[in-house]
Amino acid sequence: MIADGAVAALPDAEVGGVHGQAIDKTMESVAAAYGGGAIGVILSGMGEDGVCGLAAIRTRGGLTLGQDEASYQVYGMPRRAAELGLLDRTGSPADLGAIIAALFKLPSPAAAVASEPHEREGARA
């Protein structure tokens, strides 16, 4: 959870126990702390955890991204977010990383890896 500009852990009881909506609580705190500057990303997973958190981010003007069905392992969480119209963009995890990198004018992770020398001093093959 984000509170007063710092990250704080919540006791299990506050997020509904081990199987509670921990992603929702985390995203909701990010939405409250950063408003329109927040970015929420939901990837492969079961259930609906994260959907309320994405809604909170989107309501405050933040960007919401979700893994697409073509690249999923378990499409439950991103599917529900898509069904509710909560996703600004969808794509593979690599696509979503490139979107975020572009927002911050950073090289995409794939481009950064491709541009690195293949052999480094002391690197193993």
Image (cartoon, helix red, strand yellow):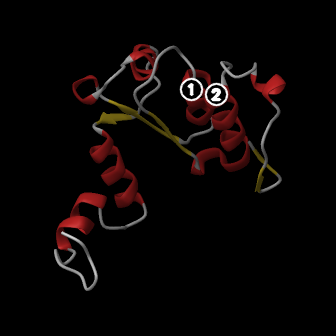
At 27% from the left and 23% from the top, the residue drawn is: 69
Cα separation between marks 1 and 2: 4 Å
Query: Horizontal placement of 40 versus 29: left or right?
Result: left
> Which element is circle 2 on?
helix
Q: Amino acid at mark 2?
A: Asp
- The numbered dot on residue 50 is 1
Residue 37, given in percent of the width and then of the height, sits at 58, 51
Q: Which amino acid is tagged 1?
A: Gly
The residue closer to the viewer here, 28 or 62, is: 28
Asked if residue 23 is positioned above or below residue 84 in the image, the reply reads below
- Give the mark nearer the N terminus: 1 vs 2: 2
Q: Are marks 1 and 2 in contact (CB under 8 Å)?
A: yes
Q: Quadrant of residue 14?
A: top right
- Residue 41 as seen in the image, left or right of residue 20: left
Q: Residue placed at 30% from the left, 26% from the top? A: 72
The structure residue drawn at horizontal position 83% and vertical position 53%, both measured from the top left corner, is 4
The residue lying at 58 percent from left, 47 percent from top is 38
SS at circle 1: loop
Q: Which residue has dot 2 on it?
A: 24
